[in-house]
Image: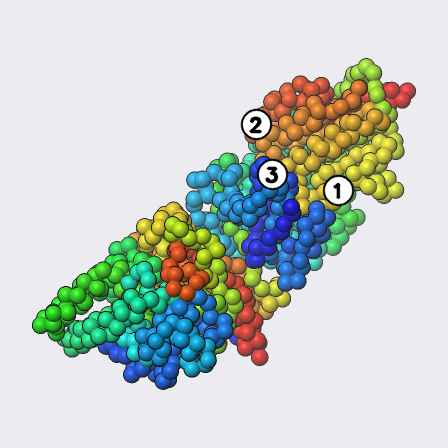
Amino acid sequence: MTLNNIEKANSVAFDKLLRAEPQIVDLGLAKDVIPGFGEKMILHAGPPLTWERMSGPIIGAVTGAILYEGWADTPEKARAFAAEGNVSFDPCHHHNAVGPMAGIVSPNLPVWIIEEKNSGKKSYATLNEGLGKVLRMGAFSDEVIERLHWMREVLYPVLKNGIRRYVADNGGLNLKSLISQSLHMGDELHNRNRAATSLLIRSLVPSLIDAESDNPDLSKVVRFMAGNDHFFLNPGMAAAKVSLDSVGYVEGSSMLTVMARNGTDFGIQVAGLKNRWFTCQAALPDVLLFPGFTKEDVNRDIGDSAIMETYGVGGFALAAAPAIVQFVGGTPQDALNYTKEMYEICVGENKHFTIPSLNFRGTPTGIDLIKVVETGITPILDTGAAHREAGKGQVGAGIVRMPSEAFVKAAEAFVEEYSK
Amino acid sequence: MKRIEVVKGEYYDSVTLMMVAKELKKIQGVGDAALNMATEANVSIMRAAGFEVETDSLSPDDLLIGIDFEGEGIEKLFDTARSYLARPPWRKEEIEAEYSPVTLSGALTVLPESNLALISLPGRYAAAEAMKALKRGLNVMLYSDNVSIEDEVELKQFAEKNDLIVMGPDCGTAVINGKGLGFSNVCPTGPIGIVAASGTGLQEVMVQLSRRNLGVKHAIGTGGRDVTSSVGGISFLRAIKELADDSEISIIVAVGKPPAPEVRKKILESLREAGKQSVICFMGDAPRKDEGSLYYSTQLEECAVVVEALHEGGDVTLAREKLRTEYAKVSGKSSTGELSGRYLRGLFTGGTLCYEAQYIAQSYINPIYGNAPLRKDLKLENSLKPVGHSFIDYGEDEFTQGRLHPMIDPTFRAEQLKKQSEDSSVAVILFDVVLGYGSAENPCSDLVEAIRSVKRDIKPVYVAYVCGTDRDPQDIEKQRSLLESVGVIVCESNARAATLAANILSRKER
Amino acid sequence: MSFKELLEDGPRVVNIGMDRFYLDLLDQEVPAVKVNWKPPLVKSSLMEKLKRLRGDDIE
């Protein structure tokens, strides 16, 4: 391995990533469409995790999922059910799926099906429930479970028919194009998805009307989507996931293909190191807190949404979303500075995702493991923070710096692998 | 209560850490605050200060924050410390707002026409960064010390092959085309070119030239080890060559420590071939006779005087004699009334200034002990407990571990000044104040406060030299007035101050 | 930029280390950029191996 090979390998990986064309092609139930989905299986965000090590938000979300699935009928019984080993847990990533915050996927949850046009690879993500007391924040109250049922019984069938109509008329719904446009409209696609959500709804509504105009629930469905600024996040994450998956194994490449957290651990994967996880303790977010919450309430960093930064957006495109920076406690100059810093640890600049305030410079894309360890700069994310106690929801949002130990471990493995 | 927090993997330079500690100590109830990167040496220092440090899984790239606070809510202070680190209260907002790249590569996208990397990182990282810079075609000024001699040789050989220069390691001062790098005084530009191994020696020569309205075009620093046989004078010789080739330079000055014999030979040869007049001041050398275009000096002001004479086409010997006459007058002014005590104490921030002062003083009084003495056998056992006549250089390593250099932060030396002043055996105190870029904003104020607060029936006589020009940011007139307002006798050069101080005492002894 | 060019053109500086030097350069209107330097995450021996793999010592 020499300069030519690592640089070339990263170039290959980078090109593959940029060529990926993620599209929404369908919806389905997790148990029916997600490969390897076992009977009493629950998928979660981040690297592998056992029940004993799970943090509050995940425990809460698992409790909610068990109640939703009907495997138990009270929260206490649900927890016991899991504690007794009746559920098999697996990372979403092991099944080509991604989930924000707790990232819980249970058998009967409806999921988006995203396909990468060139390779045919697929990825999956649940439907976003909205803000407040929601499953992904670890909430499991009756309200949460009822909403999940509504989404399965009402939202899902209507959406599925609408998507199928869209695809029949137009082919897959191009997500990359929506992401490109929303970056020019003030989104960064992790904490701010308002423009992308609007564009998605705009794309879908004609087909929804064509397919479901007789359905009295259509208006509720549209209102539900329109009332949720983060509706795009889930398919957006699946788009990122399938694009990074399409890179696959690239010998000698130090480019990251996964960054993910599960509320306890942070984990990464590297294109030149196959599907190995390199993990360490997840960061404790030092973020702007909503009123009534204190530092002691914050759970460790959580969610597969780090895939957005791995894809070249989110915190890496903060310069495109100065409004979000205020919300998370910084200044517009901070937004610019964070993005500029990320260029220094990336393989290249993304010609498809450009930032108007940087003269339409492409976003920093393709995190380079070697640059990270060399510069001492780890990636930043722009993320929500959950309450450490199950069921208490979101406590704040802000910029979080990823911990370094996982990168150190990956660097050691990289040297070992390529010094043979 | 004393508490330590470890912040893993966050690096800050020592100056920032000490300034944050200083800010924290301003808060009521904070008895002590110390921020240090967790090197072995620093861990010892923190432990000595009473902080309990757990060293398993601690690395030198982790940050230790130690706070001693009486009262509730010490956690808030750690938060404050962190916010000071993130947004230093003493920084100008606009400059901070701009993006600072995190790598040399990043920097080169911001300023692609860069031609010099000024590196002041801890020694263990400095060499690697210097090599990176050289490979990107940048010259290097290496302010950092604690760089191995092997690294120095590797860097300088690489630089030589690639037509670049490495100034340093341990190069604190340089001037390129009239612009000051590192610690430097604001001087006029003119037809003089200097190559120097030392810091304050170079500063004094430039200041004395400036007093005589002589400007310097370039002052190239080489670091103290360049003229040893291992390094072979690579930078020194290259600098001489460029100064020789520069048509705007008419006189070359070489300042430093005595070189290794074979290096000295090469230096003298290249100065002779330069086709210009040269003034050589290797401090610690035996006096030598001028020969041809080479003029010798053993003192810094004298060096400037010789340059002046050469520049004006005057008689160098006469100029030297005139200077000696002036020094004699200075010694003549040395009766200052009643003296209490027997000893002279020198408190210095500049290493070469301390050396020169000792050299001059010891012809009037001796022995002179110190922490950087003229002879090994004169070394003090404890630099904080001087005996007899003693000169202390507070810029020496033993004082700058975990403490800012005294030119940057006058506090520690001011405390020692007060201590020495209250010692009844001390009759005369001599000290330097170095102005210019890099130095403290108001270097005399702490010293003056210390002098004012001295409790003693008859205070010692204070003699000082302010090494600066009228263009330096600290306002030299204000600094001098401050000193004079508490009775300090301010002299016009380091040599004069040392001469006066030594004579005041030796007269009394007579 | 060779040493000669540095002397002829005057310094245009990348400051790596103490901020005060950078600020003093700005004061003299010297073109300068400061690097917000951080140490590598890994031991120097590992960093050397990574650099070698990357071909950094190839001139």
Crowding at mark 3 (Cα within 10 Å: few <14, some 14-19, many 20+) = some
Q: Residue furthest left?
A: A214
Distance from disc 3 to disc 1, alpha carbons, whole Å, reads: 48 Å
Q: Residue at x 77, y 36 (%)?
A: B392
Residue A383 position within the rendered picture, expressed as x and y whole percent measured from the top left: 39, 59
Question: Which residue is label 3 attached to?
Answer: B29
Are the residues tagged 2 and 3 within 8 Å (C-beta)? no
Q: Which mark is residue B471?
A: 2
Q: Residue at x 63, y 30 (%)?
A: B443
Amino acid on which the number 3 mark rests in the picture: Gly
Distance from disc 2 to disc 3, alpha carbons, whole Å, reads: 41 Å
Amino acid on which the number 1 mark rests in the picture: Lys
Q: Residue A349 vs residue B108: left or right?
A: left
Distance from disc 2 to disc 1, alpha carbons, whole Å, reads: 29 Å
How many numbered badges does the structure rendering display? 3
Amino acid on which the number 2 mark rests in the picture: Arg
Residue A76 position within the rendered picture, expressed as x and y whole percent measured from the top left: 41, 72
Screen quadrant of the C terminus of chain B: top right
Q: Would you say residue B229 is visible in this rendering?
A: yes
Secondary structure of residue under mark 2:
loop
Q: Residue at x 81, y 37 (%)?
A: B385
Question: Which residue is label 1 attached to?
Answer: B257
Q: Nearer the viewer, mark 2 or mark 3?
A: 3
Q: Nearer the viewer, mark 3 or mark 1?
A: 3
